[in-house]
Image: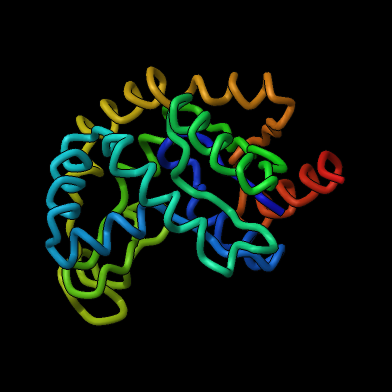
Amino acid sequence: MRLILVGPPGAGKGTQAVHLAAHYGIPHISTGDIFRLNIKNETELGKLAKSYSDAGNLVPDSVTNEMVRDRLTHGDVANGFLLDGFPRNVAQAEFLRAILAEKSAPIDAALEFSLEDAEILLRLTGRRTCRACGTSFHIVFEKPAVDGICDKCQGELYQRQDDSEEVITHRLAVYAEQTQPIIAFYRSEGLLISIPATGEVSEISARAISALSAAVN
């Protein structure tokens, strides 16, 4: 299975990517994880990526494309992969199609998780992250035992800059302008499968697997 996950920020793509990658026995390739590692290590790429993400903007294609090209040369992708966070625009989608054509290994499906903006704002503005260990909580859906304190390490919980309402609203506008057109791209390629990203995590996973089983031979 060679699978792409698409959908707005806050739709749960990262969570579902873990479940789907385990189900299909394929590596979960997340550009977000790669960026965060570079940010943590304060590499030049990390500093550049952080300057964009803190403002709610996307990392430039020139950086992201080559990162993905290199990742897809690794041996663990021989039996498939799941891409989470790439492509984010039509130019990246065309780049991906071209490099996979060289390998005669085209995408099997682009799975879209659809969610209303109001639900996205509720999900993301309510997130709180531990400064010490990075564990995430939510002021509505996953409250810590003690307000403002991490259950795991008793570190301080805070709202990340990119979880503020102002930044999220901007991210949604950026998504609509730059990323949403890839949905039309994959629909025209006959590869788009769309499911609602509402309900429990297990319900969404089952919905995704059922839709993929019906569509991919």
Where is residue 115? Give x, y as percent: 53, 32
**Nearer-the-camera pick, 203 or 210:** 210
**Colour basis:** rainbow
Q: Position of residue 38 (x, y in %)?
A: 22, 61
Split into 4 quadrants, where in the image is the N terminus? Answer: bottom right
Residue sitting nearer the eye, 50 or 137: 50
Q: Nearer the viewer, residue 41 or 136?
A: 41
Is residue 19 rendered to the left or right of residue 148?
A: right
Quarter assignment of residue 152: bottom left
Residue 83 falls left or right of residue 190 = left
Q: Position of residue 97 (x, y in %)?
A: 58, 35
Is residue 95 placed above or below 180 in the rendered structure? below
Does 204 sit left or right of 58 as displayed? right
Viewer-nearest residue: 86 or 114: 86
- For image coordinates 41% across by 38% down, the residue present is 9
**Which residue is farthest bottom?**
153
Q: Quadrant of residue 138?
A: bottom left
Q: Residue at x 59, y 22 (%)?
A: 185
x, y (%) of residue 103? 63, 48
Query: Residue at image x 28%, y 55%?
Result: 35
